[in-house]
Amino acid sequence: MSYPYQITSLEAYRAEWRRSIDDPEGFWSDVAGHFTWRRRWDKVLSWNFTDPDVRWFEGARLNITENCLDRHLEERGDQPAILWEPNDPQDAPRVLTYRQLHFKVCQFAHVLHNNGVRKGDRVCIYMGMIPELAVAVLACARVGAIHSVIFGGFSAQSIADRLQDAHAEYVITCDGAFRGAKDIPLKSVIDDALVSCPFVKRTIVFTRTRTPVSMIKGRDVWWEDEIHKVESAGNPPFPAVEMDAEDPLFILYTSGSTGKPKGVVHSSAGYMVYTNYTFVNVFQYRPGEVHFCTADIGWITGHSYIVYGPLGAGATSLMFEGVPTWPDAGRFWDIVDKHRVNILYTAPTAIRSLMAYGLGPLQGRSLETLRVIGTVGEPINEEAWHWYDEHVGRRRCPIVDTWWQTETGGVMISNMAGVTPSKPSHATLPMPGVEPLLVDEAGREVVGNGVSGNLCIRSPWPSVIRTTYGDHERCRTNYFSTYPGLYFTGDGALRDENGYYRITGRVDDVLNVSGHRIGTAEVENAINMHAGVVESAVVGYPHDIKGQGIYAYVIMGELHGDEELTRRDIALTVSRVIGPIAKPDRIQFVTGLPKTRSGKIMRRILRKIAEGETQNLGDTTTLLDPGVVQDISKGRINR
């Protein structure tokens, strides 16, 4: 398979980007023409960013799994679609060819159908990183159901919140999952979540860890038993359900500036076209190469660049069940050599974590097959960029520093490997179809180079968020109301003298911890659920490994006994309400918070103190009690 829309020179990039902005309909019509459609579109694009209302490829009919699976069967049916590396390196890897993956997806589509799942139903998926997770995702898409994958680290309460918001009547899970030295009891967590979700009709359970689980008659069924029923019926093919271009493909929950996670909705056609296009161009993928994205499918990176983007392009995608530091810090490098990986796509947090182990784990690993390396999830600092370049890429592999979001569906700003220029810690140039701009606080565009501002996007790209599930007004308020007529990313950025973009971090009340976005309000709500807590405020601070750590200022009613034990209790409360990823790194007990006379917490001051700046805190005269700032500064935690 060749990719006629693959850009291979800087001159071609500039021409294609300009065409995509001047004639987006013509540009994306040409790209989309290389996909399989049941019916072609009547109109390429209708949009406004006021409601917002964005529609791509109106009138088209398709099913994304026909593009990810069926269309590859004749030419590359025996090529590996998914390579799976298990958690324990002593266990055998698995290979699923395109023909085998297609067969398993059709099989499980029958299972879903037999259990009542129909087009438009919401299906929650809470599984470990095993091939069956990809099978479940694709089978949902094949029957026209809307999948909502939940990361295996979330708590029962977090799962219940998402199930209730989506009113997902079907759940797919495992008995348990392996992650490093830990066994995660997935079914047990689901059982706790379902106590408050009586509307769930069916839970399908795959056997992975052989952990004893409770199976409720009439609700819970074993994956293997259901597959046996399909086999007994002769394994008939499952025709893909025809979808409208704008039918929802999936819901993925992400934190925002309020306490309640929001369900980002992506459409079928636009998302398909954009993830494929960006996969092929950012990584400069060559047919037959092995692409290793280290993300979990529970995050958007896994959706777009483990499943849909690579499979749409007929690529070989590697899934890894474990963690980069178990059984030792050389695990990634072993996998690269073992599976002859050509493209490695990971998070700056993982890179910084591995840097801390020194160069020992890299000794004896050749990494000779690597051609492209990339980063995702957060801006990469220069020190980590150079370490990655020198010791992993051996100064011969271009690094793609990709900036994008759950809401954007695919990469928005990035250099293209070996084609467009790279610069340490800079995402550099926008993808075709993406027109970024910087604005000041008043919404005025900041023009020229060598400037900074709030990062916005001027017009829609095919995989732009369509809505937040069940609450379109929230979508408008979060992304399109701050600067009317623009999509506001929530990130700040600078544009250097060459016009390259560097993302400088969040400018709203959202933290970026290890590449995962966590709303401060969500963490505060969880802290406040601890019995002794009166009030709390959470900010981010620089963290050597995570990029951003979570610093919590907590007012207690009465602090009895051991402060350290109380901190651990609060951290455990957050783990149980949200999940371990949201645990505060530092908890400082305070007698008050810096508030204005109107009751607004001055997070700017708290952020400076958390960062170690205790002197130049700016004007505090507008505070209700300026003295509280001095007390907080004196009690700052530095460990």
Image (cartoon, rainbow, N blue to C red):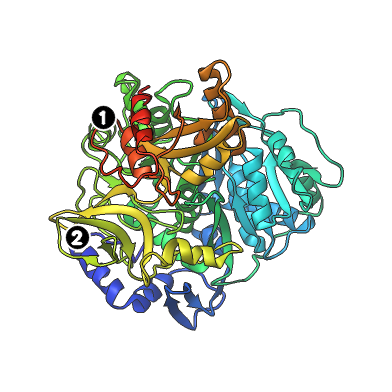
Please state which amino acid type lies under the numbered disc 2. Leu
Secondary structure at numbered mark 1: helix
Residue occupying image coordinates x 64% and y 44%:
159
Quadrant of the rendered image containing residue 352: top left
In front here: 145 or 558?
A: 558
Left or right: where does residue 574 sit relative to residue 444?
right
Residue at the image point whose x is 78% and y is 47% from the top = 226
Q: Residues under labels 1 and 2: Cα distance?
A: 27 Å
Q: Is residue 502 above or below residue 446?
A: above
Q: Where is residue 578 shown, x and y percent of the image?
A: 58, 39
Give yes or no for contact between labels 1 and 2 (Cβ–Cβ under 8 Å).
no
Looking at the picture, how far across and down is residue 126, in whole percent? 63, 43
Farthest residue, direction bottom: 42
Secondary structure of the residue carrying numbered label 2: helix
| Closer to us: 326 or 216 | 216
The residue positioned 73% from the left and 41% from the top of the image is 205
Q: Residues within 10 Å of mark 2 (few under 14, many from 20)?
A: some
Residue for badge 1: 391
Name which residue lies at 45% across and 58% down: 409
- Is 182 situated above or below 481? above
Position of the C terminus by quadrant:
top left
For mark 1, does the 10 Å Cα neighbourhood hold few (<14), some (14 to 19), or many (20 or more) residues?
Answer: some
Looking at this rendering, what residue extends furthest in the right direction? 217
Image-based side of 103 in relation to 224, left or right = left
Query: What is the x, y in percent for residue 237?
Result: 70, 60
Is 165 located above or below residue 129 in the figure? below
| Circle on res. 10 | 2
Name, please, the residue furthest toward the top.
562
Q: Amino acid at mark 1?
A: His
Q: Position of residue 464 (x, y in %)?
A: 44, 64
